Amino acid sequence: MISVKELVEKSTKITIPQNFIRLDQEASTTSDPSTFPTPPIIDMSRLLSPQYSRSELLKLHSACIEWGLFQVTRRVHNLYQ
């Protein structure tokens, strides 16, 4: 399977391969940002917490697989001040 990086490097005209197209989602017909999907939010302090680290790590894993990005909350260095 070809990666997105390889597509960009090898092509002057990019055609999106079928394996990158998700047919299970409806196309958005609006440009209203309030209707756009919200990326997952990862709480970095929970990654260090014995109580929540496993669930937050699973959430991080899912965000990387499904979205390829995530939003980070709470700066870790503030936890120890």
Image (spheres, rainbow, N blue to C red):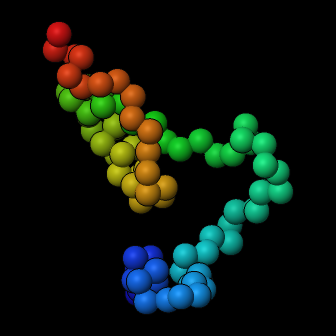
Q: Position of residue 50 (x, y in %)?
A: 20, 27
Q: Closer to the camera, 48 or 5?
A: 5
Q: Position of residue 75 (x, y in %)?
A: 29, 25
Q: Determine the residue located farthest toward the right in the rendered image.
A: 29
Q: Is residue 54 left or right of residue 70?
A: left
Q: How many marks?
A: 0
- Answer yes or no: is residue 11 visible: yes
Residue in the image at 30% along x and 42% along y: 57
Q: Quadrant of the N terminus?
A: bottom left
Left or right of 16: which side holds 73? left
Say left or right for 37 vs 19. Answer: right
Q: Is the residue 29 above or below the residue 3 in the image?
A: above
Residue 78: percent from left, percent from top: 24, 17
Relative to 54, residue 52 above or below:
above
Q: Residue at x 76, y 62 (%)?
A: 27
Residue 49 is at least partly visible in this image? no
Q: Residue furthest front?
A: 12
The image shows residue 70, relative to residue 20, as above or below, that is above
Q: Nearer the viewer, residue 78 or 26?
A: 78
Q: Quadrant of residue 60?
A: top left
Q: Kindly identify the residue that appears in the image at 17 percent across and 10 percent down.
A: 81
Residue 43 lies in what quarter of the image?
A: top left
* Residue 55 pos. (x, y %): 34, 37
Query: Can you name the residue that lies furthest to the left here?
Result: 80
Q: Residue at x 78, y 43 (%)?
A: 32
- The residue most toward the top is 81
